[in-house]
Amino acid sequence: MRSRESAALSRTRRARREDLIAAAIQVISQDGYGAASLERIAREAGTSKGNALYHFSSKEELYQAVATTLFETGAAYMAERLRAAGTPAERLRTYLESNLRFITLNAAHVGATQRILQNSTTVQVIEVEDAAAPLRRLLQSGQDSGEFGAFDPEITALSIRAAIDMAAFLFLRHPDLDVEHYISETVALFLRAVQPAPAPSASASASAP
């Protein structure tokens, strides 16, 4: 009996935390970072500031949960799709598409997290180098198999991460942007960049001095 009650209580607490996270995203998206007091967020969630402090010890802890939830949800979204990809080229395509697609599907959460990171000195996120590490390994595996050409995996991985991070700003600031075209062009650009250089044609070799 107690275990069922405990499980029900845990589910209720988790739901309340999720409500507060969603409310923080909504308030920051609508009114901006400066207007997002804990009292305002609690009101948006249909609860009191005291109840909000029961679930989060401070506004900064709530903001940390907003950022952490975004990265964890994004990682799970990508992992599910990457498992179905086979070759390095397929994995790179899936990596790009799933990242960019996740941004479009979670624009408000991405925007709220960006504002938090721009203003908070305590919220911690994955560093760019850590985020790029799996991508760097993917690119290296493509080179090792001969499917990809010669390039610096570190620089290329960081360039891909920069393009994805910039997309988050572009999608939010340009609501009329054709995101499908943006995604397809970005994917095509980097898939071309990693391809091996074409072998010289017979005619070119014959005309060489």
Image (cartoon, helix red, strand yellow):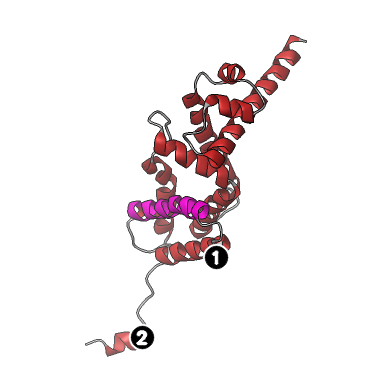
Label placed on residue 157: none
Residue furthest to the right: 1
Which of the pair 196/174 is nearer the observer? Answer: 174
State whether residue 55 is above or below residue 173: above
Figure disc tally: 2
Q: Is 1 placed left or right of 145 in the picture?
A: right
In the image, residue 30 lies at what x, y percent?
56, 41
In the image, residue 192 lies at what x, y percent?
44, 67
Residue furthest to the left: 209
Residue 79 in view, yes or no: no
Residue 149 in view, yes or no: yes
Label placed on residue 202: 2
Q: What's the magenta region?
A: 154-173
The residue drawn where x is 59% and y is 44% is 77
Residue 97 magenta-drawn? no
Kind of element beneath mark 1: helix
Q: From the image, tell me which residue sits under label 1.
A: 181
**Viewer-side label of 1, 2:** 1
Q: Quadrant of the N terminus?
A: top right
**Marked residue nearer the N-terminal end (1 or 2):** 1
The residue drawn where x is 58% and y is 45% is 106
In the image, residue 111 lies at what x, y percent?
51, 44
The Cα atoms of the two marked residues, 1 and 2, are separated by: 37 Å
